[in-house]
Image (cartoon, grey):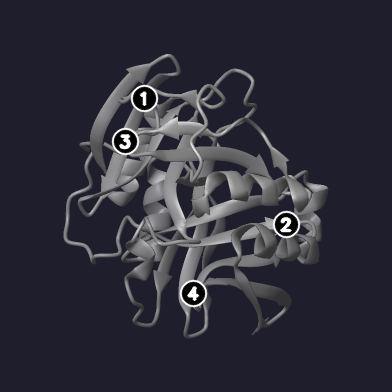
Amino acid sequence: MSDSYSGSHSSSHGRFLWYELVTTDMEGARAFYTDVMGWGAQDIATPGMAYTLFTAAGSAVAGLMGLPTDAREAGVRSGWLGYVGVDDVDSAAARAHELGGSVHVPPKEIAGISRFAIVVDPQMATIGLFRWLTQRDEASTDLNMPGRVGWHELIATDWESAWRFYAGLFGWQKEETDTGALGTYQLFSAAGQTIGGMFNKPAAVPVPFWLYYFNAADIDEAMKRVKAAGGQVLDAPIEVPGGRWILQCTDPQGAMFALVGTRRHHGLGYFERIPRGSPRDRG
């Protein structure tokens, strides 16, 4: 089969539709992200477990749930999980298996809301499959909305092999490719919109994973809030094309996330500037 998935799909197929934080401390994570992102938080009734919705401008942007005891005992850590829209969750789960991945959570339905599954790609990065069961607006497809995810990045063992898996599963298309000091950075799109990139992980990174960049109004203010709320900043803000800056962090429970935003005060000589055409260039 070719890299591109052929067939007729809905406008949400291949787009990231939902994000979920699975954590060892729900209350601590709730306090951290409402402080850092300015999100609202709303507890909802879910059979058999506690679940919180994070909201921005009155709309749900992500979910929060506790890490099950058996998962903790198996060594699973707190982390963010992205869910990609598919037309048929069951067929997509079967397709993921055919492409060399494995099904971690078989297709399940949340009555009247959604159907989902969780799969692991051949390099052990985790991704969700998702379909709303009710009509939803397309606000989540705007990558620039405050408080929402603005970029999706796969840190892979072998991005070319990973690309074949994801293109075959979601029908993503290759966009601009950059080769720089960090190696090749491959941008990809869904339904004509560039939504992320993938590259090979440095040797110091133990396992492949997906990293999600949340939009922040001011990267310096966001960095201060991360530190004040007990999170860890992993590097200094890095400038990317378009006058935007990125910052990688972990929350107090160890879940890694990233921020992307502008800077109101442009001091010279303090922050590293990346030339145009570098990794994380959206094209």
Q: Residues within 10 Å of mark 2 (few under 14, many from 20)?
A: many
Q: Which residue is mark 2?
A: 23
**Which callout, 4 or 1, points at the residue further toward the start of the chain?**
4
Front: mark 1 or 2 = 1
Which residue position holds label 1?
Answer: 278
Q: Is residue 122 visible?
A: no
Residue at the image position 46 percent from the left and 72 percent from the top: 115
Image coordinates for residue 8, horizontal then vertical, percent: 16, 61
Q: Residues within 10 Å of mark 1 (few under 14, many from 20)?
A: many
Label number found at residue 187: 3
For disc 4, the marked residue is: 57
Q: Secondary structure at mark 1?
A: loop
Locate the N terminus by quadrant: top left
In the rendered image, which quarter is residue 137 located in? Answer: bottom left
- Residue 46 in which image quadrant: bottom right
Q: State if disc 2 and disc 1 touch (CB < 8 Å).
A: no
Task: Residue lying at the far top in this picture: please name it.
Answer: 181
Which residue sits at x=34%, y=82%? 135
User: Residue 233: which quarter of the image?
Assistant: top right
